[in-house]
Image (cartoon, grey):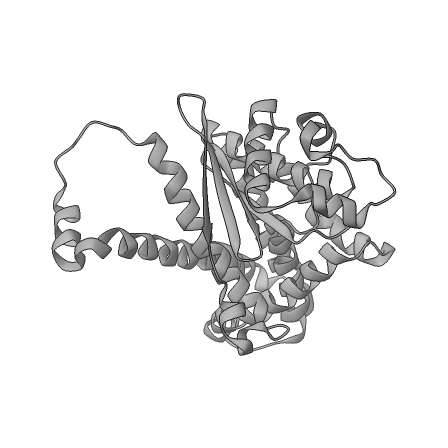
Amino acid sequence: MKYSGIGGQAVIEGIMMKNKDEYATAVRKPDGEIEVKKDRYVSMTEKYRLFSLPFIRGIFSFADSLILGMKTLTFSASFFEDDEEEEPGKGEQFLDRVFGEKAEQFLTGAVMVLSVVMAVVIFMILPLLLANVLRTFITSESLMAFVEGLIRIGIFIGYIKLVSRMEEIRRTFMYHGAEHKCINCIEHGMELNVENVRKSSKEHKRCGTSFLIFVMLISILLFMVIRVDTLWLRIITRVVLIPVIAGISYEILRLAGRSDSPLVNLVSKPGLWMQGLTTKEPDDSMIQVAIAAVEAVFDWRAYLAENFPAHDHVPDSEA
């Protein structure tokens, strides 16, 4: 495997691929055509030197992914909105009066903040409260932290299994698989075409799912060491230490994406196993969308020629 630097995410009936400061969102429209929008996004880790330091960069890289993710999701959703004009509701009219042209931007930001708050409550605070019920029977603080971590992982698995029952989410997981398969195809020295992508793996070590698993595992180890006396202090530590946990998890994920050592591969296995829930095998039409997104921002032929010179590749005129 040769690190390519490209990454992405699944959106509604499509895929976003990012390479350095350029990103492209490819969407399969209702009429069957593929719409590709290319743009630039300069991450906070590039704008500010402080934000690019190890363990700090993970926090802002996560924020970048949320911002760009909401932006590309909004773009993909625009193709599937009801064309019939409806009278704006009172909420929309209020936002238009207060924020004017920035109403949509405000609403997107509010949704993002609310999503983060809900994630913290569900995946950090709720497991602590559920584990606290067992405190009468468990006297070891280390064991309590371990049980809390198991509950956290259980909630995450249950959540993924629940939402995957929805048709739209299931298709998004298929596009997620197409994204990974495209990157794996390139990074293993194969030409980017439907046939090669189809036989590539749908699991990838740099996936956001792996990041979340690292967050959960690191939180278990950290809370085994950090001990406080009251429930309120435990809740505060769960919230305050999220940036620390995210920073450590990002560094592990970053290393995993650049190394094929046996130890790194072993550490990556829990995340790869979990991707069995968040990725599904795509159909060929989805793979075509993924390829369109990659080719808009990444010269895979030049990458293969540089990193796999011993292989014979298709010339541009024949591709």
- Indicate left or right for 22 with 299 as reference: left
Residue 276 image point, x, y percent? 66, 37
Residue 75 image point, x, y percent? 38, 42
- Indicate left or right for 161 with 108 as reference: right
Above or below, 27 relative to 232: above
- Which quadrant, please, contains the C terminus? top right
- Can see residue 144? no
Count of numbered circles on the image: 0
- Can see residue 76? yes
Residue nearest the observer in this picture, 73 or 118:
73
Above or below, 315 relative to 251: above
- Indicate left or right for 105 with 115 as reference: left
Residue 120 image point, x, y percent? 46, 59
Residue 275 image point, x, y percent? 65, 42
Residue under the point 52% across and 72% down:
234
Residue nearest the observer in this picture, 170 or 121:
170
Q: Which residue extends farthest front?
A: 317
Residue under the point 58% across and 28% down:
288
